[in-house]
Image: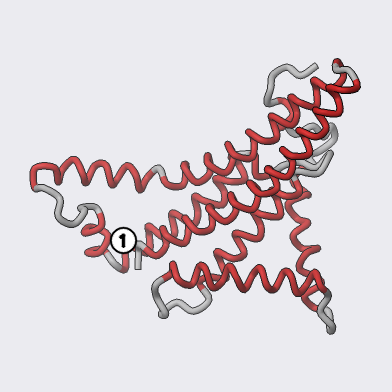
Amino acid sequence: MMANLFSSFDPSTNIFSLNWLSSTLLILAMSPMYWLVPSRWNMMWASLLGTMHSELKILVKSDNFKGTTLIFTGLFTSIMLNNFLGLFPYIFTSSSHMSFTLTLSLPLWLSFMMYGWVMNTTHMFAHLVPQGAPSALLPFLVIIETISNIIRPGTLAIRLTANMIAGHLLLTLMGNAGTSLTIPLLSVLVIAQTLLLMLESAVSLIQAYVFSVLTTLYSSETN
């Protein structure tokens, strides 16, 4: 019996924590890239990375920083694989914990802010005041913009964590109710869980895309 609804997301290894090893499986996805003859998996992976590169290149808006999209493409890949791995049974969902998501968002946001305020100070000050705003509202707008900039890493982390927890929690609750159902209702439950699992697969991809796109937009504001 679970102590609370979120206990299914707690690390449960007795000797020492092996849960976070699932995040290192990204290395296994990289090894086929070194094959002489590309496989279909390798071609699909290259097509996905190329699509993400073309999408993020539009958001960067600067040709002075070559290879910038590689950072955000790698971020997308890492989050997507961790989200998908969490859908398999008995695999720890790293992206449902703030210690994982905040570790991704906070260092990137800090680096963007440090670069922007050191290299483009005038631009960063101008960004605090929307163009065409009334003079009477300028002090309040500066405070609001400052607060919105400060909470950005938190909102990135909470958005990803909450979306991962919500679907996994619903799947857990539906699975726990299956032991007390009759055969007809159990069939309906299996179909509902299958459809929800398909939805969660789409959410895993979308949340990784949203995280990487928002991070790219935050970086483009400092240039």
Where is residue 200 drawn, in percent x and y? 68, 43
Image side of residue 186 versus residue 143, left or right? right
Rendered residue at 15%/50% (across/down) = 133
Residue in the picture at 91% in, 22% down: 183
Check the image and report above or below for 217 versus 6. below
Q: Residue furthest right?
A: 183
Residue visible at 72% across and 38% down in the picture:
196
Residue 145 is situated, as x and y percent measured from the top left of the image, at 28, 46
**In the figure, residue 32 lies in which quadrant?**
bottom right
Q: Is residue 130 left or right of residue 213?
A: left
Badge 1: how crowded within 10 Å, few (<14), some, or many (20+)? some
Whether residue 61 is situated above or below residue 185 in the rendered picture: below
The image quadrant where one finds the C terminus is: bottom left
Label 1: state its secondary structure.
Answer: helix
Where is residue 100 drawn, in percent x and y?
A: 62, 45
Q: How is the image coloured?
A: secondary structure
Q: Residue furthest left?
A: 135
Give the number of callouts. Answer: 1
Q: Going by the image, does 81 lie left or right of 106? A: right
Q: Residue at x 83, y 32 (%)?
A: 190
- Residue at the outermost bottom position: 36
* Residue 27 place in picture, x, y as percent: 77, 63
Q: Is residue 62 above or below residue 176?
A: below
Residue denoted by label 1: 117
The N terminus appears in which quarter of the rendering? top right
Work out whether residue 209 or residue 121 is closer to the camera in this orientation and state it: 209
Q: Amino acid at mark 1?
A: Trp
